[in-house]
Image (spheres, rainbow, N blue to C red):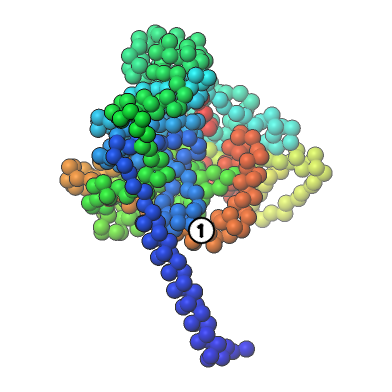
Amino acid sequence: MAMSKSAKVLLLLGGLFIGLFIIAVVALLFAATSMNRPSVSDNSVLLLTVSGSMPDFVPDDPFAKALGVQQPQSFTGLLTQLRKAKVDSRIGAVMLEINFPDIGWAKADELRDAIADFKYSGKPVYAYMEIGTNREYYIATAADRIFLPPPGDLYINGFAAEAMFYKGSLDKLGIEADVIQIGPKYKNAPDRYTRTEMSDGQREVINAVLDEYYSRFTNAIAETRKKPIEDVKAAVDTAPHNASQALKLGLIDGALYREHVEEELRRALNYRENEPLRTIRASQYREIPSESLGLNNGEKVAVIFASGAINVGKSSSGPLAGEMVGSDTVVKAVNDAANDESVKAIVLRVDSPGGSALASDLMWNALENAKRNKPVVVSMADAAASGGYYIACNANKIVAQPSTITGSIGVFLGKPVIKGLYDWLGISSEYVMRGRNAGIFRETVKWTPEEREKMTDQANTIYFDNFIPKVAAGRGKSVEEIDTIGQGRVWTGTQAKENGLVDEFGGLEKAIAIARDLAGLPSDRDVKRVVFPAPRPFFETLLNPEESMLFGNTKTEKAIADSLPADVRRAFRYSSLFDRMTSGDAMLIMPYELRIK
């Protein structure tokens, strides 16, 4: 039935009214947010909590803030607070409240660098922990003074790396992984499904990483605590230490309860007797715009975040799958930044163990095209390995931390063979095929010699005709040189720099500074950091059934994820990637999830 003219008018007016109502609500919320912007008292102490998941980047959304929606603290957001506090004359000191941050060792290095940079202001930094393990204490050593409460403990017991293998479980289920690896000694990603223990290559690499991490850790303690390296190693070997023991060993500056640490700060900042300590939390301080402090002004530099495993499609994040780098999202962001004349350079922030070879190449191509218009600089976070290195290799400059896990230049293909599981369940299947290789992805039989030969050709093409030549061209080296340091071998940032895979040590701010210089912008002026793609408004995500807590999907998934052991959650993160291999997508991914405690 056709809609009457009056009905159309009413519908139009109704839509217009709703639109105006939403605009009015948003305007009021923004006004309220601006009016409620916190004031910072002179000689205040900025309280920075270093704790929890701390994703690399979380967009600030004023609308979400106005609605009272709690936004998680991001790692780069934490660094921004330190940058602001350094130049803010109202901030007299910083106190770090360190409580088991879920970050890797490269980000720990980046945070220590940011703390050291803040200290150039002459303002003190205090660190307070209730319990300190290796990573917490490593971060704390960048502070001027370190405190534990009297019942606190210091678990600086040394380093242990864990590699988990699932073959025993798969055997019980009647599932076998059929894989092809290019770089068989070091490209050990399938080992978790094909072995029950470390290979010689994996053990060699892990030992090399542990040696470097342990050396950096003990040297950092020796330097900051003014102790001989032999004494530091002895303290590690005799750990854990309670607060009293840690104080006697010179590892901390006081075994004090929190209120007594605040008393120390009051004295350090020359407060009058009985004058209360003025503090401001990061959740409030981040509402102070960087621009109001003379930062984040000037010409634009695009910052694009690629955090998580690499896959085709859009970037996403979920409790089970974790963060995923989607090629569609990153390619569009790179293209938009390259075509935006107001953007003078591009910084790609990579924190990824790799993933889909196809998705990696699509992003590599977008960055290669972008380089024709403006400089491209890569900032590597905790990991930029395999596919994560693929998308970085053609940048004008690559910046990493000494502890960044990178390299892993290799490829593997595979499929699960689940005939044993089917037999156990009483399931049978038959295939009717046309074409010699029509059944190449059958899940009930291993590859035939002919099929394996075809798939090996596919893997060789990706490695020898794409990955290796592109790295060689990007790094200005021969194919033979890259193949020698490739073969799936994982390197630390220090080793990668020695091998020519990395140009400079530093974090995101160092990468932005290099991008500014390459773009010919004044070195004595700041630049405006613009995130691509522009963060979607909270209102849009609120109405998205796939993302909104209102629709239950994310809430249900989070409840499931929270009920699972951490190791099981980690296994889920790779399930969607490995599912793509049944369609022929090769994987450029780290040989193992390296967890060093």
Binning the other alpha carbons within 10 Å of mark 1 as few (below 14), some (14 to 19) or many (20 upward) gives few
* Residue at x 56% of width, y 91% of height: 4
Instruction: Report x, y in % for residue 196.
Output: 64, 25
* Relative side of 177 to 477, left or right: right
* Relative side of 179 to 524, left or right: right
Residue in front for this viewpoint, 405 or 111? 111
Whether residue 538 is situated above or below residue 50 in the rendered picture: below
Which residue has dot 1 on it? 541
* Relative side of 33 to 577, left or right: left
Instruction: Report x, y in % for residue 267.
Output: 32, 25
Q: How many marks?
A: 1
Q: From this viewpoint, which residue is outermost toward the right? A: 426
* Residue at x 53% of width, y 91% of height: 5
**Toward which corner of the image does residue 337 lie, by quadrant?**
bottom left
Residue in front for this viewpoint, 367 or 129? 129
Instruction: Report x, y in % for residue 141.
Output: 38, 23
Instruction: Report x, y in % for residue 331.
Output: 40, 54
Residue in front for this viewpoint, 148 or 198? 148
* Residue at x 60% of width, y 31% of height: 192
Q: Secondary structure at mark 1?
A: helix
* Residue at x 48% of width, y 43% of height: 308
Residue 404 visible here: no
Whether residue 281 is situated above or below residue 366 in the rendered picture: above
Residue type highlighted by circle 1? Thr
Residue 313 visible here: yes
Q: Which quarter of the rendered picture does the N terminus lie within?
A: bottom right
Q: From this viewpoint, which residue is outermost toward the bottom? A: 5
Residue in front for this viewpoint, 197 or 596? 596
